[in-house]
Image (cartoon, rainbow, N blue to C red):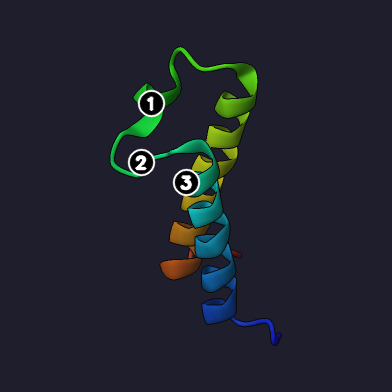
Amino acid sequence: MRFNKENLKAHICKRMMDLEKQWGFDPQNGFSQVIKSDIHRIMAYGEYQGLEYLYSDVEYNNIGE
């Protein structure tokens, strides 16, 4: 696979969807969905949120500025 913006975004989306499926995350619910969760689910949500931020940075060309 060639490295470019669209491939990177697709990879990030796939990983986010995998986390949604595995942990039951809802992109509309925010941190409240993990408040009383175990540490593993909270850490997975941190990864999920980080991927969301990264996707946004890639989408809006905020990387490297």
Most extreme residue toward the bottom is 2
If you read the primary sequence from the N terminus, does the residue marked by circle 2 or circle 3 appear first? 3
Label 1 vs label 2: CA separation?
A: 8 Å
Residue appearing at x 35%, y 41% in the figure:
26
57 lies left or right of 63:
left
Residue to which mark 1 is pinned: 33
* Residue count near mark 2 (Cα–Cα under 10 Å), binned few <14, some 14–19, many ≥20: few
Label 1 SS: helix
If you read the primary sequence from the N terminus, does the residue marked by circle 1 or circle 2 appear first? 2
Towards the viewer: 28 or 4: 28
Point out residue 39 in the picture as x, y percentages from the top left corner. 63, 19
| Residue type, label 1 | Gln
**Mark 2 vs 3: CB contact within 8 A:** yes
9 lies left or right of 33:
right
Point out residue 38 in the picture as x, y percentages from the top left corner. 58, 16
| Res. 39 visible in picture | yes
| Residue type, label 2 | Asp
**Mark 1 vs 2: CB contact within 8 A:** yes
Rendered view: 1 above or below 32 = below
Point out residue 27 in the picture as x, y percentages from the top left corner. 35, 44
Label 2 SS: loop
Residue appearing at x 43%, y 59% in the figure:
56
| Res. 65 visible in picture | no
If you read the primary sequence from the N terminus, does the residue marked by circle 1 or circle 3 appear first? 3
Q: Residue 19 carries which label?
A: none
Q: Which quadrant of the figure has residue 41? A: top right
Residue to which mark 3 is pinned: 20
Q: Which quadrant of the figure has residue 33? A: top left
Label 3 SS: helix
Q: Which mark is residue 26?
A: 2
